[in-house]
């Protein structure tokens, strides 16, 4: 993933989205699951996880391949 960003912004390009998702998903997951259980819809949680996995899969499929390219060719 680091090859997707120029060297000047590589740390921010990797760190910011990662930390944002960890905070949002990791911080809210227990509350969402508890709420779903309280209304008797705990099975919906699996669909939320599946949707996140599908979004991640689509993102990785659409990422350009950078193998064999020099660092100066990646923009």
Image: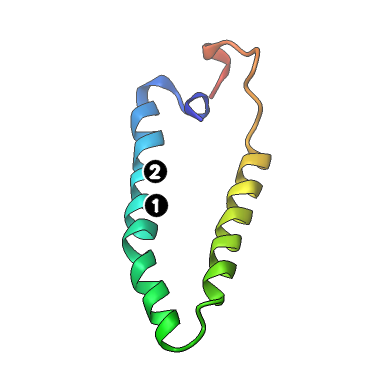
Give residue 11's position: percent from left, percent from top.
35, 29
Corner quadrant of residue 53: bottom right
Please name the residue shown 35% across and 59% down the image.
24
Secondary structure found at label 2: helix
Give residue 48's position: percent from left, percent from top.
54, 67
Q: Which residue is mark 2?
A: 18
For label 2, the crowd category at 10 Å Cα-Cα, with few meaning under 14, some 14 to 19 and many 20 or more, is: few
Please name the residue shown 39% across and 52% down the image.
21
Nearest to the observer: residue 54 or residue 70: 54
Give residue 59's position: percent from left, percent from top.
61, 45
Corner quadrant of residue 73: top right
Q: On the picture, is 38 further left or further right than 60? A: left
Q: Which mark is residue 66?
A: none
Q: On the picture, is 36 further left or further right than 58? A: left
For label 1, the crowd category at 10 Å Cα-Cα, with few meaning under 14, some 14 to 19 and many 20 or more, is: few
**Alpha carbon distance from label 1 to label 2:** 5 Å
Mark 1 and mark 2 residues within 8 Å of each other at the beta carbon: yes
Secondary structure found at label 1: helix
Q: Which residue is mark 1?
A: 21
Figure disc tally: 2
Q: On the picture, is 20 further left or further right than 5? A: left
Please name the residue shown 40% across and 35% down the image.
13
Above or below residue 50? Residue 58 is above
């Amino acid at each position: 993933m680091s090859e997707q960003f120029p060297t000047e912004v590589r740390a921010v390009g990797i760190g910011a989205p990662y930390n944002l998702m960890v905070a949002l998903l990791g911080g809210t997951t227990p509350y969402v699951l508890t709420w779903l259980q309280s209304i008797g819809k705990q099975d919906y949680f699996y669909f939320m996880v599946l949707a996140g996995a599908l979004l991640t899969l689509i993102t990785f499929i659409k990422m350009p391949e950078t193998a064999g390219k020099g660092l100066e060719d990646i923009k």
